[in-house]
Image (spheres, grey):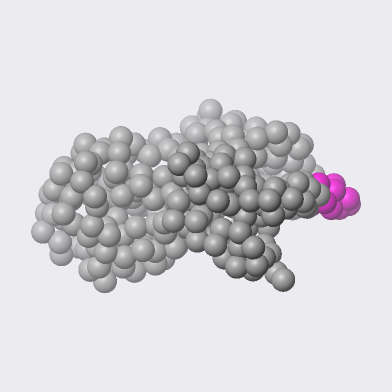
């Protein structure tokens, strides 16, 4: 029987919250996706873990027996990963990224990090938008460049605050405007992040500035998929101003959008992680952004 750590984390979260909706918010996943994973886990195990009650769910007898085992496995795995990292004679700082960073931040920060942590290597890791933590939740990244909002359990330092605009086909009628009111985009099909992105998906669909449900034309997991969909005429997408400069494409136009709060690009790390390499990288970025 193959049970993944993610499924155990989902089980423990629901067992602690005794409410699937609250657990989904805590895990930064959609409620349907969490319910589906629980059903998959129960099918693998061959017995139910929860029973539904008016207030949410309660553990079955089998679930109550399994809960401390699942907690122990997760704790032992996390301790083992940290121990393995500490045992390395030289280290590698893994930096998760969901988009290109640019903005004059990365190169100077890496130079300062290497000066502060001689012997340490840096690995840049592209993470899909189906993981809004940028790889921090499962331990595959040490720090991550991500857009707010972020899942619980992370600390952040905001690096840039930028207005949101829209990327749309160059021949789109709205591309004739210098600025586009968000109300003019509400009936347009949008390119959306995957549902697993949770509140981050909502933010880039502009749900914080609309009362109606957006029209989703295409779901995309990477920037390349997003902008290929835009140039193919499948929809429009909200984009941070700095990213519009990084992802120019033939056949695509960018226009600022009025009526939207700005987006925030941040560096994130796990709460309680005060390892020297992580703190050195955060300090390097703080120095760079202070100079900008």
Q: Residue 172, image x and y in percent? A: 15, 61
Say if the magenta span includes residue 219. no
Q: Residue 219, image x and y in percent? A: 36, 63
- When asked about the image quadrant of residue 207, the answer is top left
Q: Is any part of residue 143 visible from this angle? A: yes
The residue stretch that appears in magenta: 78-90
Q: Main secondary structure of the magenta part?
A: helix
Q: Residue at x 44, y 63 (%)?
A: 221
**Which sits in the foreground, 247 or 270?**
270
| Left or right position of 36 against 139 | left
Q: Residue 171, image x and y in percent? A: 15, 64
Quarter in which the N terminus is drawn = bottom right
Q: Is any part of residue 82 visible from this angle? A: no
Say if the magenta span includes residue 80. yes
- When asked about the image quadrant of residue 54, the answer is top left
**Which sits in the foreground, 205 or 238?**
205
| Left or right position of 179 against 243 | left
Q: Residue 245, image x and y in percent? A: 36, 52
Q: Residue at x 43, y 38 (%)?
A: 264
- When asked about the image quadrant of residue 232, the answer is bottom left
């Amino acid at each position: 029987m193959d049970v993944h750590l993610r499924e155990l984390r989902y089980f423990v979260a629901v067992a602690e919250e005794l409410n699937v909706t609250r657990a989904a918010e805590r895990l930064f996943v959609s409620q349907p996706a969490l319910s589906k994973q629980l059903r998959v886990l129960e099918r693998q195990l061959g017995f139910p873990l929860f029973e539904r009650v008016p207030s949410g769910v309660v553990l079955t007898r089998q679930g109550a027996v399994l809960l401390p085992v699942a907690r122990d496995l997760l704790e032992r795995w996390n301790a083992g990963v940290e121990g393995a990292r500490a045992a390395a004679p030289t280290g590698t700082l893994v930096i998760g990224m969901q988009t290109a960073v640019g903005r004059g931040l990365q190169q100077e920060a890496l130079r300062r990090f290497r000066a502060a942590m001689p012997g340490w290597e840096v690995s840049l890791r592209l993470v899909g938008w189906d993981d809004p933590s940028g790889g921090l939740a499962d331990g595959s990244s040490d720090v991550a460049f991500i857009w707010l909002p972020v899942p619980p359990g992370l600390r952040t330092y905001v690096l840039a605050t930028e207005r949101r605009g829209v990327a749309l086909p160059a021949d789109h009628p709205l591309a004739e405007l210098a600025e586009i009111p968000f109300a003019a985009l509400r009936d347009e099909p949008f390119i959306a992040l995957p549902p697993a992105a949770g509140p981050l998906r909502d933010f880039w669909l502009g749900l914080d500035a609309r009362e109606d449900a957006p029209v989703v034309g295409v779901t995309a997991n990477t920037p390349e998929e997003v902008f290929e969909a835009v140039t193919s005429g499948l929809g429009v997408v909200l984009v941070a101003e700095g990213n519009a400069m990084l992802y120019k494409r033939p056949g695509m136009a960018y226009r600022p959008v009025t009526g939207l709060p700005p987006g925030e690009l941040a560096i994130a790390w796990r709460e309680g992680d005060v390892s020297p390499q992580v703190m050195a990288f955060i300090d390097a970025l703080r120095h760079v952004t202070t100079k900008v």
